[in-house]
Structures are given as C-alpha cells and as structure tokens.
Image: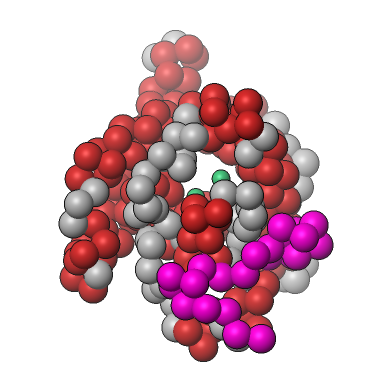
Amino acid sequence: MSTPAALLVALLATTVIVAVRYLLVSGALHWLTLRLRPGHVADLGAQIRREIGWSMSAAAIYGALGGLMLWAWHHLGATRIYTDWSAFPWWYAPLSLAVYLLVHDTWFYWTHRLLHRPALFRRYHAVHHAGRRPTAWTAMSFHPGESLVGAAILPALVFVVPVHVAVLGLVLTIMTVFGATNHLGWEIFPGRLVKGPVGRWVITASHHQRHHENYRCNYGLYFRHWDRWCGTDRGLSAALGEEKG
Ligand SMILES: [Zn+2]
Ligand SMILES: [Zn+2]
C-alpha cells in the first residue's frame, strides 16, 4: 500500500475506534440512566439523536488527529511516546500522568472560557449547550471547530513530554470516562466523595451540571483549581445536591 493510502487507512481506523469507544461508554451510561433515572432521558430522543450526529463528526476529527499522532510515532519516530518502562525511573509514570491531565485541564479551561465569548459561543460552542439538559451523549457533542481545538492538545503534547504508551492510554480512558460521567445529569459518585475533600478539587457531574445551568461558570474539565483561582467556581448544582462547606 502506498504511504498516502496507508495513512488514510490509519486515520479511518482511529476514527472508528474513537466512535466505537464513545458509543460503548455513553451507551453503557445511557443504559444505566434508563435503569436508575428513567425520567431523565424519557423525552430527549430527538436531542440525543442530534448529539450522536455531532459526536460522530467529533470522532472523525479526534480520530484524524489521534491517527496522525500514531503515524508520527510509528513511522517517523518523531514523538516522545515510549514503550520501555525502564527508559525512565518508576516515579516518572505517575508524574507524566499528572502532567498530561494538568496540561489538558488548563488547555480546556482557557479555551472553554474563550468559547463562551458571545461571538465564539454562537458560532462554535452553542452546539454543546443546545440540549435541554446534558446526557451521557453530550460528552462529545461538539461543533467541528470546537472539536479541532479540543483534540489538538494531546497529540501536540506527545511531541514535547515523554509518555509511556500505557500512560497515554490511561489519559484517554480518564478523558472518556470524565467526559461521559460529567454529563450524565445525575451524580454517579457517592455524595461523601463529591462533597468531601476530593470533590473540592476534582470535577464530577455535580460541578459540570452547574456549567450547563448557568453557562458562565465552572469551566474546568478534571480539576477545580482554575475555576477557584479565577473566581469562576460557583459550586455544585443544586439539582444534583447542594455543596456543603
Ligand atoms: Zn458540557
Ligand atoms: Zn460551555
């Protein structure tokens, strides 16, 4: 197979993987919602169909950039992705995980705040907020312009910060699980965790739900520190359980 054809096959393959991952994770959480909170999605059929449509376009963009990253790794050796655990001391793996999550969260917070500027919001971010209330399917419901911005950071980071391929897989898993559970419209984690020390710094559905209710607050992805430092943290959604303390 010629190089362009092989590259195209690689990009299509990663797109299918991203799309299937979304359908499996959001589908499983949708099934759980039907069992535990059937009223939450009962009247949202049309919204969910639209969200799945936008998410398929997002999967193509995330898949294309992810595929290019894997291509650069495999065929050009141009990234800092490594497979030999002994290449770095043992403590580097958790450190690199923390760096990837913190950089991703920082990128998301600031680009998300920008996307709430009125002109950018109307053009790019209104898609994500179009639903009457978030569902497991809202997680990847993005306009292609927003997908491009959101999908760019991790493939760019692998050229700069060394990361074991398994740690990178863990980052992608955390991204997928946080994205879907934060949009459930109900809290999947125990109240003690959400309202305790962990919930003060880590974002769950109770926090992101408030962003979908009030728009101009709670912009973070994984952590609350940027929202706290910048005065944009408005606490947890009252609908999902009032924050204490
Ligand atoms: Zn959202
Ligand atoms: Zn938003």
**Count of numbered badges drawn on the protein:** 0
Q: Image quarter for residue 224?
A: bottom right
Check the image and report above or below for 32 versus 215. below
Q: Is residue 158 visible?
A: no
Q: Image quarter for residue 240?
A: bottom left
Residue 51 appears at what percent x and percent y? Answer: 33, 39
* Residue positioned 37% across, 33% down in the render: 54
Query: Could you tell me which quadrant the C terminus lies in?
Result: bottom right
Query: Could you tell me which quadrant the N terminus lies in?
Result: top left
Q: Main secondary structure of the magenta part?
A: loop
Left-right relation of 166 to 227: left
Left-right relation of 53 to 119: left
| Display coloring | secondary structure
Check the image and report above or below for 235 versus 123. below
Left-right relation of 67 to 27: right
Check the image and report above or below for 129 versus 240. above
Q: Residue furthest right?
A: 229
* Residue positioned 49% across, 14% down in the render: 3
Is 239 part of what is drawn in magenta? yes
- Residues shaded magenta: 224-245
Residue 135 appears at what percent x and percent y? Answer: 35, 54
Q: Is residue 181 visible?
A: yes
Residue 128 appears at what percent x and percent y? Answer: 46, 40
* Residue positioned 57% across, 79% down in the render: 243
* Residue positioned 75% across, 65% down in the render: 228
Q: Image quarter for residue 127?
A: top left
